Each structure stands twice: as C-alpha cells, then as structure tokens.
Image (tube, coloured by chain):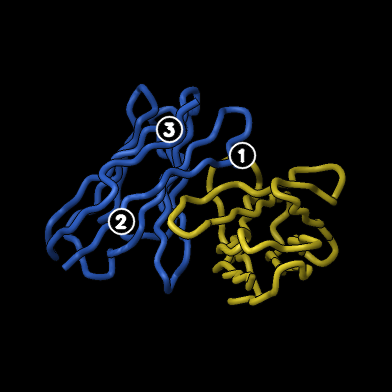
C-alpha cells in the first residue's frame, strides 16, 4: 500500500500571500488530520476531517482552514501568511476502525519570507 | 488542558547502553498512547501503541513501553541501543479514542555514540 503523500514538499511564500497544501491519504483511510511542526512549539494539531466534515479543530486562528474531498484527499489553506507560519506541515491518515492510530506523510516545508 | 510531557530534551548514550525515555500525560479519562520516531530526514513512524490490555507493549526494532495508569506514564525502553537508533522520539496521546487528534510531547532527541 502506498503511504500518505503530500504536495508540494517545499514551498516559499511571501508574507501576506496565501498557500494551499495537499494530502492524499492511504487507500481506504477516511480520516485525515493536519499538524504543524515547529522547533519552538513542537507538533500541534490543526484539524481533522472525516467523510468530508471537519470533526475536530485545534487552537489555531481562522486563517488556517481545510477541506476534504469525496475521495478522502484533503487540502489545507493558510491565508494572509505571517512569518510565524513557517513550519513543517504534516498530514496523517487513519482507518475507520482505528482513528487514533495515525500514519504520517513526509510533510510540506513552508517558508514565509 | 490536556498535555503530554517528555522530561528529557536530549539524551546521549553509547552503543549497548539501556534506554528509558519518560512520558507523562495529564488526566483525561480513556487514553490511547503512542510513541513515534523521526529518523533524520525521514517522516514520523509509529514505534508502538497502547489501547488496552497488557500494559507492557512491544513495538518495532526491540522497543517496548509500559503504561502505568496510576502514574499517568508511558515510558519507552530499549535494553541495548544501536547507533541507528539516533533519532527524535515523540510520545503522543489521544484522549477519548473516537477522533483523530493526537497531543504530542515536545520530543526527545536521542544521540547514540558508536
């Protein structure tokens, strides 16, 4: 089975711009979660989608949003980028029977200048 | 607030030494517990997990962890480390088990000297 894939792997944006990141889960997995990883804050949960519905949300501003499509692929969007948004964004998927056991993708490294 | 603490930020060991990494979580009822590992340049990989049953769980590459409910702890152990175990180790907790959000500790960087 192919693992979780994320595109693009690296991205450089300018402050004030917006960005969209994409995640394809493992085949058969319907839950997709997003995390932000930074040296200072570590790994922080952004949100989770299940069957195209946001089921859970972390403590991030409204500039961070996401969606999930009928094929379980997910996108996250960050609007009005700030320097502090520079981070590794990780996507994880899990099977319907064991939603807390998550499998992570390689991440998208976002740099905001 | 729910939280996970990893007390060791950086651990340096020689090959063949024994390893124990601490992880404590705040009370929150039913929990599912995980250890993930991130090797240099690689993505997070699941090392082991605890959902219920035997509190001593075995994972990949000779790692094991013990769930002690009374201490809210889930410490990771390995009897003899190898240079290839050099990586960052993350403890993670899912409260409730019904939704896919993990709360991670800040991680422990393990350096194994050959």
Instruction: Give the number of the mark in front: 3 or 1.
Output: 3
Mark 3 in CB contact with mark 1 (< 8 angstroms): no
**Any mark on residue A25, and which?**
3
Instruction: Label 1: state its secondary structure.
Output: loop
Q: Residue at x 72, y 63 (%)?
A: B81
Binning the other alpha carbons within 10 Å of mark 2 as few (below 14), some (14 to 19) or many (20 upward) gives some
Chain letter tied to yellow: B
Mark 3 in CB contact with mark 2 (< 8 angstroms): no
Q: Position of residue A18 (x, y in %)?
A: 16, 53
Q: Position of residue A100 (x, y in %)?
A: 60, 42
Q: Quadrant of residue A16?
A: bottom left
Q: Earlier in the sequence, mark 3 or mark 2?
A: 3
**Any mark on residue A109, and which?**
2
Q: Residue at x 81, y 57 (%)?
A: B66
Q: Residue at x 56, y 48 (%)?
A: B45
Instruction: Count the marks.
Output: 3
Q: Is residue A101 above or below residue B62?
A: above
Q: Is residue B111 left or right of residue A9?
A: right
| Chain ID of residue with mark 2 | A
Instruction: Label 3: state its secondary structure.
Output: loop
Q: Is residue B17 above or below residue A64?
A: below
Instruction: Label 2: state its secondary structure.
Output: strand
Q: Nearer the viewer, residue A25 or B99?
A: A25
User: In this rendering, do the residues under marks 3 and 1 share a single chain?
Assistant: no
**Any mark on residue A93, and which?**
none
Q: Quadrant of residue B53?
A: top right
Give how far apart the Cα atoms at labels 3 and 2 are: 18 Å
Give how far apart the Cα atoms at labels 2 and 1 are: 29 Å
| Residue corresponding to mark 1 | B98
Chain letter tied to blue: A
| Chain ID of residue with mark 1 | B
């Amino acid at each position: 089975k192919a693992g979780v894939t994320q595109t693009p792997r690296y991205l450089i944006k300018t402050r004030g711009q917006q960005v969209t990141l994409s995640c394809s889960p493992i085949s058969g997995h319907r839950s997709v979660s997003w995390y932000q990883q930074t040296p200072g804050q570590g790994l922080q949960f952004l949100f989770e989608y299940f069957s195209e519905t946001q089921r859970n949300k972390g403590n991030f501003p409204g500039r961070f949003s996401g969606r999930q499509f009928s094929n379980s692929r997910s996108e996250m969007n960050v609007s009005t980028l700030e320097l502090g948004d520079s981070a590794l964004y990780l996507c994880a998927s899990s099977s319907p029977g064991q939603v807390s056991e998550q499998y992570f993708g390689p991440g998208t490294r976002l740099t905001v200048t | 607030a729910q939280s996970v603490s990893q007390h060791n930020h950086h651990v340096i060991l020689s090959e063949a030494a024994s390893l124990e990494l601490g992880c404590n979580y705040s009370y929150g009822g039913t929990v599912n517990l995980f250890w993930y590992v991130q090797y240099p340049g690689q993505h997070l990989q699941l090392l082991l997990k605890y959902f219920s049953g035997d509190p001593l769980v075995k994972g990949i590459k000779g790692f094991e962890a013990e769930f002690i409910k009374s201490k809210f702890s889930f410490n990771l152990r390995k009897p003899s480390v190898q240079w290839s175990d050099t990586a960052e180790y993350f403890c993670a907790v899912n409260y409730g088990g019904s939704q896919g959000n993990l709360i991670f500790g800040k991680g422990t960087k393990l350096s194994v000297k050959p």
